[in-house]
Amino acid sequence: MNNDILKTLYSEQDIADACQRLGAEIQAEYKDRVPVAIGVLRGAVFFMADVLRNADTYMETDFIDVSSYHGGLASSGTIDLVTDISTDISGREVLLIEDIVDTGRTLKYLIDLLKQRGASDVKVCTLLDKPSGRVVEATSDFVGFVVPNEFVVGYGLDYKEQYRNLPYVGVLKPEIYSTN
Ligand code: PRP
């Protein structure tokens, strides 16, 4: 799997440092309150586990599974709600955990959905923010790295559902796209 990677963008150490910084920011933000942290499947699993273990504050956790890339390179433009949360978030503060914000469509869909359901506040923590990909407005409160306009994999991010278990974030060799 490592042989398919052209270059590393964020190393394991870079990611660990970012999780520590973001965890401290989350801890400070939610001091004395109990938010519901919602991980956006499947990409956010690795990041969520690491960042939230760096936040020494009370919270609940849940997951929501939405998909728009269907394993490919480009957003399909429509968001499918695959599996919903089971927490009643009416009147609750929500912290969405994402691996990447690209077009912004997923985030906008989720924020609208959670607010419709009565969340009193929705904040966003994302490992990666790619502002150059934006199609709809979407801003995050806690950002690990601002990424260049490249298709990235690893640490939760996939190409055709693979590479999520790489411990770092990198760019695939072009031949991987052309031959698969
Ligand atoms: C990816 C990623 C984000 C979303 C960001 O999910 O995990 O949720 O796309 O892209 P956007 O800003 O253009 O909407 P994907 O639909 O690939 O599902 P996955 O997490 O299961 O890979």
Image: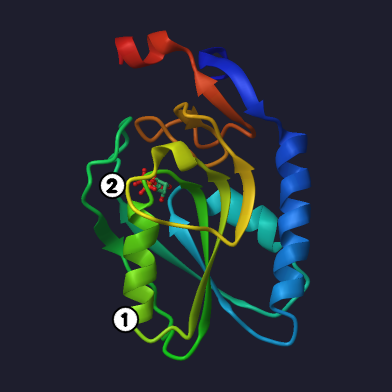
Assess disc 1: are there few (<14), some (14-19) or many (≥20) residues with their C-alpha within 10 Å of its C-alpha. Answer: few
The x and y percentages for residue 172 are 48, 19
Q: Residue at x 39, y 73 (%)?
A: 85
Please tell me in which quadrant of the rendered image residue 116 appears: bottom left
Callout 1 secondary element: helix
Q: Which mark is residue 42?
A: none
State the scheme by which the image is colored: rainbow
Q: Can residue 54 be seen?
A: no
Q: Nearer the viewer, mark 1 or mark 2?
A: 1
The x and y percentages for residue 119 are 44, 83
The x and y percentages for residue 88 are 41, 86
| Badge 1 residue CB within 8 Å of ligand 1 | no
Camera-side residue: 161 or 108? 108
- Name the amino acid, label 1: Gln
Q: Quadrant of the C terminus?
A: top left
Q: Residue at x 35, y 55 (%)?
A: 106
The x and y percentages for residue 70 are 27, 40
Left or right of 147 on screen, residue 105: left
Disc 1: which residue = 116
Query: Compared with residue 95, is residue 71 higher up or lower down, i.e. above or below?
Result: above
| Badge 2 residue CB within 8 Å of ligand 1 | yes
Disc 2: which residue = 68
Q: Residue at x 65, y 47 (%)?
A: 144
Query: Compared with residue 40, is residue 94 higher up or lower down, i.e. above or below?
Result: below
Q: Residue at x 39, y 55 (%)?
A: 137
